[in-house]
Amino acid sequence: MPKHGKKYRDVKSKIEPDRLYQLEEALNFIKENGIAKFDESVDIAMKLGVNPRHADQVVRGTLVLPHGTGKVVKVLVFAMGEKEKEAQEAGADFVGGEELIEKIAKENWLDFDSAVATPDMMGKVSKLGRVLGPRGLMPNPKSGTVTFDVGKAVQEIKAGKIQYRVDKTGIIHAPIGKRSLDLNKLIENAWLLIEAVIKAKPASAKGKYLLSTAISTTMGPGLKLDTNSLMARFR
């Protein structure tokens, strides 16, 4: 019995297995060869020449994609008083203090995609670390989600702010939009992410930095990109 369905195999048969594609042609291929009935996400995977076990070689960051991710993001904000009102006015889906913390702790309620907290709330929010941490939902100053400027944080997340972080195998996985997004907009989103990762190269990382890159949709096969051409753009 085949592992993948006929549509997957048909699309994969069109990909030259030993070819390294240019970013633009890979995205054009993805636009023209959909598999799923739903609007798939387009994702980039970048294998880096770093050792994530060393703190000074952990590549991470955030950026706002100029054309968004195409995903409707539910944002929760831990705040009180004036900051609670500011978060609501900015479009936060859930805003509150101890009552939300208790709801998550006791009911394992996780009906949101991103969480923001004011610094004065973190003492109480920190007890949710075991629940939120493994799911990538724990507010963090490095990602801009622990801040008194909750209005700006909510607006950026809603507009398409993403976080990227190298995993323990040295790979960064990140979305750049939906397959339905205009081709040129997908290309712009992709280049912004690639530039951010390349410029985030740790000083302690030696040898080749960008080892391999592939692009794919949620259900589709991946296309390997020409990493030399990606690096050359930013030299």
Image: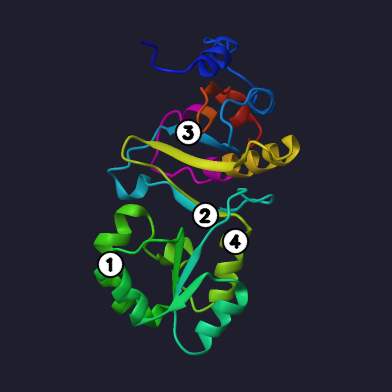
Residue 92 or 230: which is nearer the viewer?
Answer: 92
User: Residue 200's spot in the image, x, y percent?
Assistant: 50, 46
Q: Looking at the picture, which amino acid does disc 3 mark?
A: Met
Look at label 4 and name its amino acid. Answer: Lys
Spot occupied by residue 163 in the image (x, y as percentages of width and height) = 49, 52
Q: Give the numbered dot on residue 107.
A: 1
Secondary element under disc 3, as helix, strand or loop, is strand
Q: Is residue 230 left or right of residue 9?
A: right
Q: Name the residue at 64% across, 37% down.
A: 234
Where disc 2 sits, the SS reads: strand
For the residues carrying marks 3 and 1, which lies nearer the camera in this image? Answer: 1
Residue bearing mark 4: 158
Whether residue 179 appears in magenta in the rendering, the answer is no
Q: Earlier in the sequence, mark 1 or mark 2?
A: 2
Residue 30 x/y as whole percent: 63, 26
Is the C-beta separation of discs 3 and 1 under 8 Å? no
Instruction: Name the residue: 37% across, 80% down.
Output: 121
The mark nearer the N terminus, 2 or 4, is: 2
The Cα atoms of the two marked residues, 4 and 3, are separated by: 25 Å
Q: Which residue is mark 3?
A: 46
Between tags 1 and 2, which lies in front? 1
Question: In the image as oriented, which residue stretches furthest toward the bottom?
Answer: 81
| Quadrant that contains the N terminus | top left
| Residue 62: mark | 2
